[in-house]
Image: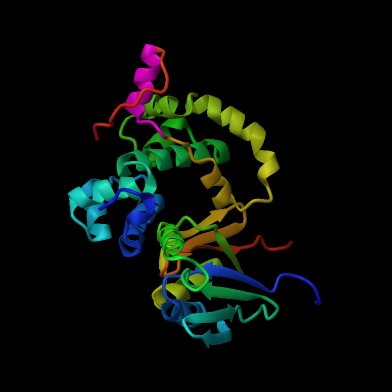
């Protein structure tokens, strides 16, 4: 693939905490972790999706002023950011494994006409849906 | 402390979100303020005020919207009798369910069932859990206030919710 989406960023409240969550609890890998003064460009990848990076960014200086950063931190903590969706082969197995690692589930797996979905949040408040697609016949 | 929406501590907001998530996950259960406050790790008085400031509605009213949302989904997606749906979504009597449902949505459960089935086809490509949230009733006034407005035939006046 030469063209397409390479990085989509999330706002998190603490990059160390987010890194530990996405790597240790969800099994992502670190792609880039570079600092420049207070600024830290941090991206992780799903192990089966090497062309896509999920950025874990803290809203704050030098990119944003303090008031804007506070507004964004509040929005994240209230769960007001857009939904994230991860596709898995087996939703219940993935939930069991993640729960053992301490992931906070907001919705138990539910069957909906052949698909199964569950919900969890990262420590900052970003909400994920975990979806097992309908099996092809 | 200022009452601006951005003035709340994000750490508190994250704990309030946990209480909201718990209501989302089990809206059929009873959620007295004491139980919610415990989930968030704050005092009861602090909880009710902080929740409303954070999410724009008092916790009890938020719970009602979730119950109506779930009932609407069950009316749309299942053939279960309306009585069964009322008890499953947390109401203790069919009368209260029907009345609250009409007060919030403006329609009876039976009418919603017919209409939702007709409209359901177009949303097949959106994840079902997200469709459900998009159909969440927008309960910006208290149920008691809605009733009063209907009874008086007037709109838009502000009235404090008692709960």
- Which residue is more in the foreground, A135 or A75? A75
Q: Is residue B122 left or right of residue B37?
A: right
| Above or below, comparing residue B104 to residue A132 in the picture | above
- Up the image or down, B104 lies above or below B11; here it is above
Residue at 54% over, 80% down: A42
Position in image of residue B7 (x %, y %): 33, 55
Residue B20 visible in the shown view = yes
Viewer-closest of A71 and B145:
A71
In this view, the residue in front, A35 or A79, is A35
Q: In the image, what residue occupies the spot 46% across and 81% down?
A: A38
Query: Range of the magenta residues?
Result: B140-152
- The image position of residue A40, as x and y in percent, is 51, 81
Spot occupied by residue B84 in the image (x, y as percentages of width and height): 42, 36
Q: Quadrant of residue B52?
A: top left
User: Within the image, what quadrant is residue A50 found in?
Assistant: bottom right
Which of A98/A121 is in front? A121
The stretch drawn in magenta includes residue B72: no
Residue at 66% from the left image edge and 60% from the top image edge: A134
């Amino acid at each position: 693939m030469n063209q397409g989406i390479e990085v989509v960023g999330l706002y998190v409240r603490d990059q160390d905490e987010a890194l530990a969550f996405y790597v240790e609890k969800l099994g992502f890998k670190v792609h880039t972790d570079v600092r420049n003064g207070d600024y830290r460009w941090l991206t992780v990848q799903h192990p089966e999706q090497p062309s896509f990076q999920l950025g874990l960014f803290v809203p704050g200086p030098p990119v944003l002023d303090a008031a804007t950063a506070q507004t964004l931190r509040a929005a994240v903590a209230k769960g007001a950011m857009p939904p994230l969706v991860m596709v898995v082969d087996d939703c219940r197995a993935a939930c069991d494994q993640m729960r053992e690692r301490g992931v906070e589930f907001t919705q138990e797996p539910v069957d909906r006409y052949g698909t199964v979905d569950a919900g969890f949040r990262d420590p900052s408040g970003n909400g994920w849906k975990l979806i097992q697609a309908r099996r092809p016949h | 402390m200022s009452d601006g929406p951005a003035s709340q501590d994000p750490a508190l907001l994250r704990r309030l979100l946990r209480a909201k998530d718990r209501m989302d996950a089990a809206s059929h259960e009873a959620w007295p303020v004491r139980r919610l406050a415990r989930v968030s790790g704050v005092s009861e008085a602090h909880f009710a005020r902080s929740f409303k400031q954070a999410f724009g509605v008092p916790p009890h009213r938020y719970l009602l919207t979730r119950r109506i949302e779930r009932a609407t989904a069950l009316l749309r997606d299942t053939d279960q009798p309306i009585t069964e749906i009322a008890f499953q979504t947390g109401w203790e009597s069919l009368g209260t369910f029907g009345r609250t449902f009409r007060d919030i949505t403006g329609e009876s459960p039976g009418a919603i069932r017919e209409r939702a089935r007709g409209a359901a086809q177009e949303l097949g490509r959106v994840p079902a859990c997200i469709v459900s949230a998009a159909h969440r009733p927008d309960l910006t006034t208290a149920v008691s206030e809605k009733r009063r407005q209907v009874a008086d035939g007037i709109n838009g006046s502000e009235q404090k919710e008692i709960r």
